[in-house]
Image: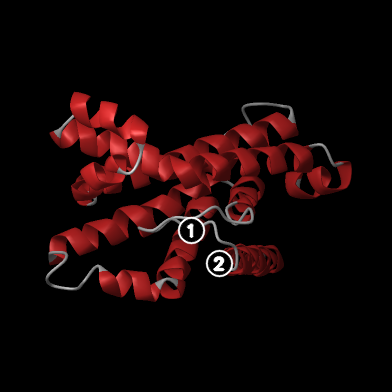
Amino acid sequence: MKATKTKRIVESGLLIAMATVLTVLSMAFPLKLPFGGSVTLLSMLPIVLLSYRHGIKWGICSGFVFSLIQIATGIDNVKAFFVPEDYKLTAALGIIFLDYIAAYTVVGLGGFFRNRIKNPSASLALGAAAALSFRYICHIISGAVFFGMWAEWFFSQYEIGDKILSTFSGASLSLIYSVVYNGLFMIPEIILTVLASIVIGKIPAICKRIQK
């Protein structure tokens, strides 16, 4: 029993480290948005696999650990939230909770469909889609609440934005801005992770490994 738990911890450490490395490597690519958020090299997939292999509780714990690492690796961005003239303390804490802790912890839900759908490829892919969609929702809430002030400027940069600005205002404009802005990196991230999950689920050797 002890050996099994130790093996699980070591395996989790390796996969979390892999997710971190993939995140860091992704910083070398020009796919980062001006106010934060970027498409990564499948950095969420290791956390999804941990949840699928060891269960949702373990996945959520792993996602939480990963969220703390994300805060540490993005410490410059985190510090910016605490600049007095830009954000109040409550707003800064809210941003960190939603955009980091909650957003990455919910990725640990990736194993939700394992015992609900027999096809491993389908269950892993659906789990990845659901988990990353929840992460997307966390970013949407944060963006609408704390970054809505940038909505008018954002849409004014594009021709199609004029129609949006003439139709929406206030909270509804902030929400649309957040859905669009966060969707620019989260939708590609979801698609790539789901496709990778489908491929993994169809490789017998890997599939057998994660099913144990």
Tag 1: residue type? Answer: Lys
Name the element at disc 1.
Answer: loop
* Residue 176 seen from this side: yes
94 relative to 52, above or below: below
Of callouts 2 and 1, the N-terminal one = 2
Name the element at disc 2.
Answer: loop
Q: How is the image coloured?
A: secondary structure
The percent coordinates of residue 179 (x first, y second) are 36, 37
Tag 2: residue type? Answer: Met
The residue that mark 1 highlights is 32
Residue drawn 49% across and 47% down?
185
The residue that mark 2 highlights is 27
The percent coordinates of residue 183 (x first, y second) are 44, 40
84 relative to 145, above or below: below
* Residue 141 seen from this side: no
The image quadrant of residue 17 is: bottom right
Residue 132 falls left or right of residue 142: right
Q: Are marks 2 and 1 in contact (CB under 8 Å)?
A: yes
Residue drawn 14% across and 66% down?
89
Residue 187 falls left or right of residue 205: left
